[in-house]
Amino acid sequence: MRALLTSLSMTVFLASVSVADPLPSWTGTATKAGIIAFVERVTDPASADYVTPAARIAAFDNDGTLWAEQPVYFQLLFAIDRLKEMSAADPEVLTSDVLRAAAEGDMEAVAASGTEGLLEIVSTTHSGLTVDEFQTEVRRWLDTARHSGTGLAYDDMVYQPMLELLSYLRDEGFRTYIASGGGLHFIRVFSESAYNIPPEQVIGSIGNGSYSAGDGPPRVMKDPGIFFIDDKAGKPVAIEARIGRRPVIAVGNSDGDFQMLEWTTAGTGARLGVLLHHTDSEREYAYGRDSHIGQLERGLDEAGSRGWLVIDMARDWERIWPSGE
Amino acid sequence: MRALLTSLSMTVFLASVSVADPLPSWTGTATKAGIIAFVERVTDPASADYVTPAARIAAFDNDGTLWAEQPVYFQLLFAIDRLKEMSAADPEVLTSDVLRAAAEGDMEAVAASGTEGLLEIVSTTHSGLTVDEFQTEVRRWLDTARHSGTGLAYDDMVYQPMLELLSYLRDEGFRTYIASGGGLHFIRVFSESAYNIPPEQVIGSIGNGSYSAGDGPPRVMKDPGIFFIDDKAGKPVAIEARIGRRPVIAVGNSDGDFQMLEWTTAGTGARLGVLLHHTDSEREYAYGRDSHIGQLERGLDEAGSRGWLVIDMARDWERIWPSGE
């Protein structure tokens, strides 16, 4: 009888441990253990590394960290779809070679145009309307466009293990922020529904803006031109300006996140840097050192000496998408 | 006996009503009643004007709204004190007439130099150091400098009735933001201790910034030049970029706040605009239409037709400073 009771309690105990696993889609590797050990260390009031709730800030990159970014940034696909619509209504919007190439879907020419061409496409398609109008367009696109590889809606191509990490951190008193090279107004359209991250916790790149009133209802306009690019060295500057605190945890996947992780982990007290390495050509994509999108070279070279954790997607993630495997 | 008991209960009842007054330093005027009626209307789930907690954003101007701004903006006094220190150590920082005038305390010449001169003084004294170093300097100044009129520390010259309003709104589920023409990094030094407003809820003007690493610890620098001025039409643009929601309540005191109130109160559903009119030459200052600092003309002209509440400081406030009368 005692043996039976013990066995029963063990079962109940194991069941409750399993229910309590905050990261069920992560395999039981050192990466998962390292993340959990860090969070326990900074949230235990008895720990020398205790961090007060107000200071518990976690900053996540978006493209390639919270959702996929291949074969090209999803926001660029939105911009090109929108450019096609705009030019069908008024061909005169195509004022340059790169805009004409983009409207024809010539992705090689778009790629060859580099950052300058990309910014021209984004600026042209992301201006001349109010923030509300723009976000309505993005929502409409997300509701209808589908990814060429998976057939999924783009905002369903978020990483289930990252959703669990966001949720776990919030349960432990962290505020989760996005710090993305992607567009602030673009990301806000799905950040709440996809990640449970409210608009005020989204940091991203932004075009020029202005206020209009008098000739219509008071409104904030999106104007041509880039106001701030939240990438590379821009990330620490924007995070500091927006939050006024150095994060305790920073999570990224490319060298565009290097400075964010460097600045974060140089702070006093316990800090955690995490890089996601895309190693899974079967379930997602495998890329890094030589990739045109999401290049990760310096990060891989220096993660070890800097004590950053590197997630090996194929090894560390049991499951990729919320909708399945 | 019954009479005694009734009288006792009445006393207890009245005492608890008095304890429950959320705005004890406000006189019992229509202004106070209007604010409380609005807050009750948008927080009552049974009301047609109910606003969900996530959307309860209140934006407050700082200079002249939360703390005093006479005889000149306190941040300018800090800048001039800092310029004096800088030029004592190295006279070569005084590269222009307006900088020389400021270092000599010639406020008339500073005033005559207009916005351009003011920005030059601010840029010179607010750059060339890290954000942390700058904020240490501001803290040191606040701890030692005293206001010429009251003898108080500048961060004690906050308005007690506004502290009560901030606290009341937070108790009712609002998040209270500062949206100030003053400097973001300057205000954050005292926003938490003075107003209980955390750094991530401070919106303000900001100079250029950059990230440095490699030649020292990773750090965010304050560089020369102005990046964004959060005043007039800049306020709606910055609030939209920072919060991603239109406030439900906006509170200001000058025409620099006009667009913030206009945009806020043009939103759908119930919205409240409030202007503080400085009418109290005895306990504080009386200024408005013709003032060089905190001019309030269009706001006074249009408040009535727009349904904005105007606080008459002399009439509506029982008490001004936390430290006394």
Image (cartoon, coloured by chain):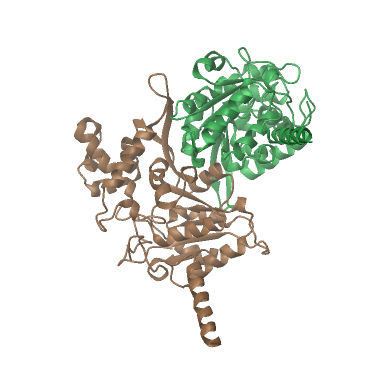
Chain colours: A green, B brown
Image coordinates for residue A262, horizontal then vertical, percent: 48, 23
Rendering quarter of residue A78: top right
Image coordinates for residue B325, horizontal then vertical, percent: 33, 66
- Residue B62 can be seen, yes or no: no
* Up/down of B283 relative to A164, above or below: below
* Residue placed most toward the observer, A64 or A204: A64
Taking A101 as reference, is B60 left or right?
left
* Up/down of B251 relative to A164, above or below: below
Screen quadrant of the N terminus of chain A: top right
Taking B91 as reference, is B72 left or right?
right
Q: What residue sits 21% from the left and 45% below the top? A: B105
* Residue placed most toward the observer, B193 or A156: B193
Taking A261 as reference, is A147 left or right?
right
Rendering quarter of residue A181: top right
Q: What residue sits 50% from the left and 60% below the top? A: B168
Rendering quarter of residue B99: top left
* Up/down of B11 relative to A262, above or below: below
* Residue placed most toward the observer, B275 or B48: B48
